[in-house]
Amino acid sequence: MAVISFTGAQLEVDAAHDSSLKHLLPVLVTGSHGFRLLAVWTKEDAEQRAMYIGQAVLGVQRYAPFIAGDATVVGDFNSNQIWDRPDRQYRHAEMVELLEGRGLVSVYHHHYGEAQGAETRSTFYMYRKQERGFHIDYCFALKAWMPYLMFVQVGAYADWRHLSDHCPLVVEFDFETRSGPLHLLRWIRSRSERIDRDTPPVGAPRSRWM
């Protein structure tokens, strides 16, 4: 997992870091607009209760004080509401509810007006196959930030398939001028500008993966 700044903002791992939650990292971002960032990359784990979404739910609970106030929770959650089952100890919908209870909403879903589990743009292509697209990467940010939201985009499959099985979820806020994108975002935009033409709706069968 990496958290990288291209804007001169300073990054520092917060003292609240709990090494037992090895797939989550609390980061203090200081600069023109300081905030707290909880980076997420859920993975397989020998302890079944902490598989994928379980890690995210436990992390949100553990870092509740850290993500209070100006904060964002971002990363590869390897999760979607389509895989929720009543017999599972932890569920994607539970995590979304926990975050919304702290004033954090999914920026993608807010921007596109889509429901959890009904996404039309994939961020991950299993085995890099276009027909096996899923939405599993998220940026949750304060609902109070939404008036400053400038740009949301998911990278196009055709542009990214040779680089990764994931496509970037790009989110831009402008708390100062509400204008010009950052250099990194300009570069990603240039590679992702065909999103509406090249990226198909998420297709079935989804439930076979998890």
Image (spheres, rainbow, N blue to C red):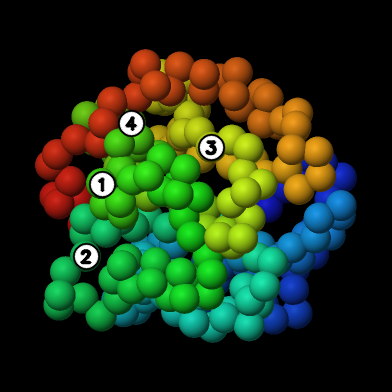
Question: Between tags 1 and 2, which lies in front?
Answer: 1
- Is 189 situated above or below 43? above
* Amino acid type assigned to the residue bearing label 4 in the image: Arg
* Image quarter of residue 70: bottom right
Label 1 belongs to which residue?
A: 118
Horizontally, residue 144 falls left or right of residue 93, namely right
* Image quarter of residue 11: bottom right
Checking the image for residue 84, the label placed there is 2
Question: Between tags 4 and 1, which lies in front?
Answer: 1
* Disc 3 to disc 1, C-alpha distance: 17 Å
- Quadrant location, the N terminus: bottom right
Answer whether labels 4 and 3 touch (C-beta < 8 Å): no
**Whole-percent x, y for residue 28 in the image:** 76, 66
> What residue do we see at 26% from left, 31% from top?
201
Label 4 belongs to which residue?
A: 128
Horizontally, residue 186 falls left or right of residue 54, namely right
* Disc 1 to disc 2, C-alpha distance: 13 Å
Q: Is residue 32 visible?
A: yes
Answer whether labels 3 and 1 touch (C-beta < 8 Å): no
User: Who comes first in sequence, dot 4 or dot 2?
Assistant: 2
**Whole-percent x, y for residue 145 in the image:** 63, 55
* Amino acid type assigned to the residue bearing label 3 in the image: Val
- Is 81 situated above or below 67? above
**Whole-percent x, y for residue 44 in the image:** 36, 64
User: Who comes first in sequence, dot 4 or dot 3?
Assistant: 4
* Amino acid type assigned to the residue bearing label 1 in the image: Ala
Checking the image for residue 152, the label placed there is 3
CA neighbours of label 3 inside 10 A, class few (<14), some (14 to 19), many (20+):
some
User: Who comes first in sequence, dot 1 or dot 2?
Assistant: 2
CA neighbours of label 4 inside 10 A, class few (<14), some (14 to 19), many (20+):
some
CA neighbours of label 1 inside 10 A, class few (<14), some (14 to 19), many (20+):
some
